[in-house]
């Protein structure tokens, strides 16, 4: 999809000059025309979420200097405003052999993070309960 857009519709999306970053210029156009063509949805937030699951990092602020005043998060991606940019060291223009190295993050990573968050919440709630009991 990115190669097609880069060659045929670069005002919507394509590569940056160095070929190491996907740049999306029109989220609205991506949602309306290209996401449904290549994926089973037309939701920019879902697309961004999938990019994140596969190790792509949002580098929009680095690319734009945050000139439009938005935070360029997935929620602003859905509005169609601003430029979005994503980078993965294994997704480089003209280096298709690198793509095989891209792997979806495992649920184990997510489960470990959730476990740490749950433990932190237990500690905080215990501290708060202790303070309330002391009152």
Image: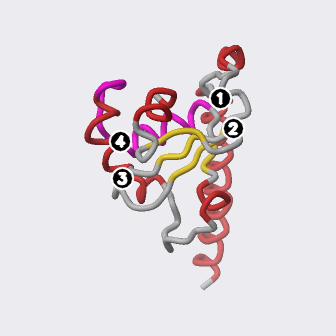
Sequence-earlier tag: 1 or 4:
4
The image quadrant of residue 61 is: bottom right
Q: Classify mark 3: helix, strand or loop.
A: loop
Picture quarter with the N terminus: top left
Q: Which mark is residue 93?
A: 1
The nearer-to-camera label among 3 and 1 is: 1
The image quadrant of residue 9 is: top left
| Prevailing secondary structure of the magenta residues | helix
At x 68% / y 46%, what residue is drawn?
A: 116
Q: CA distance from mark 2 to mark 4?
A: 20 Å
* Neighbours of disc 4 within 10 Å: few (<14), some (14-19), many (20+): many
Cβ–Cβ under 8 Å for marks 3 and 2: no
- Range of residues picked out in magenta: 37-54
The image quadrant of residue 33 is: top left
* Neighbours of disc 2 within 10 Å: few (<14), some (14-19), many (20+): some
Residue 88: x percent and y percent? 67, 35
Q: Classify mark 2: helix, strand or loop.
A: loop
- State the residue position of label 4: 30
- State the residue position of label 3: 78
At x 44% / y 33%, what residue is drawn?
A: 5
Cβ–Cβ under 8 Å for marks 2 and 4: no
Sequence-earlier tag: 3 or 2:
2
Residue 14: x percent and y percent? 52, 39
């Amino acid at each position: 999809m990115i190669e097609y857009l880069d060659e045929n519709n670069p005002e919507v999306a394509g590569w940056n000059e160095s070929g190491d970053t996907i740049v999306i210029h029109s989220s609205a156009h991506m949602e309306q025309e290209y996401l449904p063509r290549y994926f089973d949805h037309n939701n920019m937030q879902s697309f961004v979420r999938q990019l994140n699951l596969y190790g792509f990092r949002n580098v929009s602020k680095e690319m734009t200097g945050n000139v439009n005043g938005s935070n360029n998060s997935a929620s602003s991606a859905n509005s169609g405003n601003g430029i979005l940019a994503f980078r993965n060291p294994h997704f480089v223009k003209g280096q298709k052999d690198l793509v095989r190295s891209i792997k979806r993050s495992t649920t184990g990573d997510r489960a470990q993070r959730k476990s740490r968050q749950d433990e932190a919440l237990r500690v905080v709630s215990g501290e708060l309960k202790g303070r309330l009991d002391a009152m």
